Amino acid sequence: MKKIKFLLMAFVAMTVGAGFTACSDDDDDNKSGNFEKYMTSVDKQVKDKKAKSGNKKALLLVAFGSTWENAHKTFKSVVADYESDPAFKSYDVYFAFTSAICINRSREGEHYASQDFYAPNYWLEAIGRQKYEEVRVQSLHVIPGEEFLRLRDSYIKDFKNNIYNDLDTKYLEDVKVFIGGPLMAEEEDVEAVANVLNSEFNKYVQGDNLMAFLGHGNPEGYNYGNGNIRYNQLEEALQQKNSNYFVATVDQEDNLLDNLFERMQEQGKVKSGVTLTLHALMAIAGDHAHNDMSGIENEGDSWREFFVEKGFKCQYDGNDSNASNNCILKGLGDYAAIRAIWKAHTKNAVEMFAEEEEE
């Protein structure tokens, strides 16, 4: 029996052929008159790459985005990892942000040299114009939350429904479109991620010392696919390996900083002189890692400072390479074993618009 991942087939049944298109980030580009300018730039990049490679398959990697320099280095390493993987040698690899804010601020050069990034709709449209026979879209998000659902239910559906009315109808009928789920798309992925994290960071949770991972999460009360449960599942999986691991978020109700500290108290982990190490549970170490976690810019309002006030040892001095820093400013994408999970999802991606196989 074919395994149906993260309710894709239910989505397909509701949307394919309905002629419904959702709002996407290019609405603002149309209003500002920038759509054609951006589309022209992406068209040229895709046309030139396809002409050079001769490939008939395209792979679009999609992340939320960031404006921080080390985050961009992580994104580049992820793209390079895919491009060097023999499994994807027949694919032309492209890269997109889903966050309009990150796209716009990257163009303005916030925290990083000015660089143009584009939303998935531009890349998918350009890929369609070049008539790639197969299109794989890989989410570089961590959970099946808001950003992943928008990628799946808006961008890809709009592409297949020919939102701009300029793609060949026969081509759209024939092109195969696959989607690879986020890092913890399925519950079984949680255990795989826990194994990687424990392998990388077990040295930080020896004795009474603790380690906490900062995830993003989605606000409750919205239909975000129940992706938040993955954070709870990950903490449980990690604590089965070592009870000194914790996972909390900046946006998941009942799993915020105060809730994290309460759990530590309830489990008897708050002791004098304990060292706490912090690490972002995000693809990259961007704004949340620099500010919410370590307090580089919003001094006095970070996780690190909160725990220092509670008596923990949690040092950070980003200007001192010799300092004993307990805020690890790396993203999950910096670890090859984590990237391997995303790549496995790409290789086993679900064909979105195929008819469901009979049992």
Image (cartoon, rainbow, N blue to C red):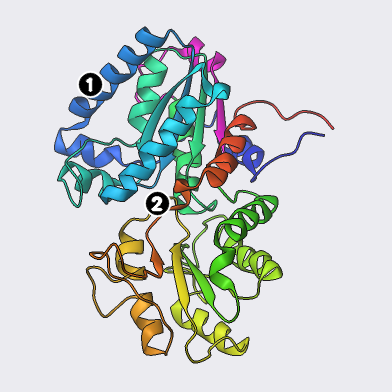
* Residue at which label 2 appears: 284
Could you say where residue 43 lies in the image, as x and y percent from the top left?
29, 19
Front in this rendered view, residue 2 or 69: 69
Could you say where residue 7 lies in the image, as x and y percent from the top left?
65, 44
Residue bounds of the magenta highlight: 162-180
* Residue at which label 1 appears: 40
- Residue ID at (66%, 71%): 242
- Residue ID at (65%, 55%): 195
Front in this rendered view, residue 141 or 146: 141
Residue 202 among those drawn in magenta? no
Label whose residue precedes the other's in the sequence (2 or 1): 1
Could you say where residue 10 lies in the image, as x and y percent from the top left?
65, 41
- Which image quadrant: the C terminus? top right
Q: Amino acid at mark 2?
A: Ile
* Residue 169 sits above or below residue 42 on the image: above
Query: Tag 1: Cα neighbours inside 10 Å, few (<14), some, or many (≥20)?
Result: few
